[in-house]
Image: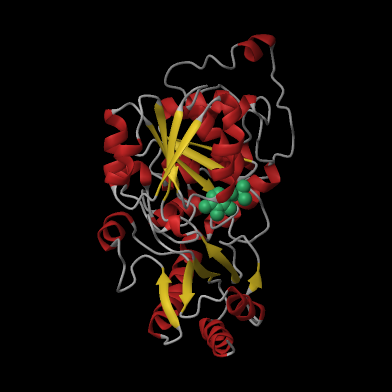
Amino acid sequence: MSTRFDSRNAETICAHLGDDPAQHNGAVITPIYQNSLFVMETMEELVSNYSPAPGTHGPVGGMMRRFDYTRTANPTTDVAEKKIAALEHGELARCFSSGMGAISAAIMSTLKAGDHVVTIHSVYSPTHQFLTDYLRRYGITVTFVTGGTVSDFEPALQQNTRLIDLESPSSFVMTQQDLAGIAQLAKAADIATICDNSWASPLYQQPLDFGIDLVVHSATKYLGGHSDIVAGVVVGHTDRMQKLIRGEGVLLGAVLDPFSGWLLTRGIRTLPVRLAEHCRSAGTIAQRLFEHNAVEKVYYPGMPDDPQAEITAKQLHGRSGLLSFQLKTSDLGAAYKLVNSLRYYGIGYSWGGFESLALARRVPGELFGANEADRVLIRLHIGLENVEDLWQDLDCAIAGV
Ligand SMILES: *Cc1c(COP(=O)(O)O)cnc(C)c1O
């Protein structure tokens, strides 16, 4: 099946790319290769495994002749990697044991001691912490910008800037960055670019097409989709990815276990239908919140008052289920009370699964721009439950405050 595969359509990629029943007794699902080691027939085979004959199609984009050890690569996880690489319009993808495993590997693959990074205030907070607290001990410095326009980035660049780290849309206030404009600015100064694409998933945005060097995902979110795995992935073109796989991938060893790799592939097979439903339901909820007289503002790309409408139209071809809103009251207690009274929404930090979630937080003003005041936001993940159940629950909770 895979040898005859030439579709570029996401639904067909999710269903079939990378699967090869003929290799596995006709099994329609690639089995779980739950083994550390793959043995060879001869010593010659063993020692030549990393010098593949030119033009051959071995594992990890032909970097090797055969699978040898699961820290290097595993046939079960390889299926997920092939699907994700194709969905992102990249050449190679590498799975990690968490989103943070993928993000830290991607960041480290671009930096050395003494380098400088530019990122956005609203970047995922463990990424923020890794860039500041952790990388400080390697002499790496960071500048944070609001990031809504390319001109936010220009004054932040220094002689030693080697990375611009992006997250578009960001996952609390859903602000976007102009990927093509930033990639162009970065390339001219030999600066690498990374974009966390977890919000849009590879279905609704392909940052590599805009010139971004590496895309990272928390595959714990939409790619897995069932809140039953923790996983991450980095995607890019061959040169950068080969270096990252050999270095941060194989050496640092935050490898995805085969069972999680298998569950990840299972999640990806239904990604198009799940995302379509998240998009439809979240669109309905967002519009009703927008029209609600107790609501000050909805943070979700593509709303009628979208301050970044041009970027939304250029970069996103769909919206996922994660949105935030702000009540007219800025009382954190009222926001907590609202979240506590929801019946169908779990209270928790994650998102991207089948289930609806909610939480409230005071968000620092700097995420919105210079001289902006703090705002109290309620973040919702709209899951796959009945949308009228979700709306009634929310409407009732709003009325209660
Ligand atoms: C959850 C998340 C991560 C981290 O992923 P883990 O799988 O929890 O390590 C990174 N970026 C974003 C935007 C996330 O939401």
Q: Residue 175's spot in the image, x, y percent?
A: 39, 58
Q: On the image, which quarter does residue 359 sit in? A: bottom right
Residue that sits furthest to the front in the current view: 371
Q: On the image, which quarter does residue 188 sit in? A: top left
Residue 130 appears left or right of 279: right
Residue 169 appears left or right of 259: left
Quadrant of the rendering where the C terminus is positioned: bottom right
Q: Nearer the viewer, residue 75 or 191?
A: 191
Q: Residue 143's spot in the image, x, y percent?
A: 44, 39
Q: Residue 394's spot in the image, x, y percent?
A: 55, 83
Q: Nearer the viewer, residue 171 or 219?
A: 171
Q: Residue 177's spot in the image, x, y percent?
A: 35, 50
Whether residue 1 is visible to the viewer of this picture, yes or no, is no
Q: Residue at x 64, y 52 (%)?
A: 263
Residue 369 appears left or right of 198: left
Residue 219 appears left or right of 372: right
> Considering only vertical position in the picture, is 7 above or below 66?
below
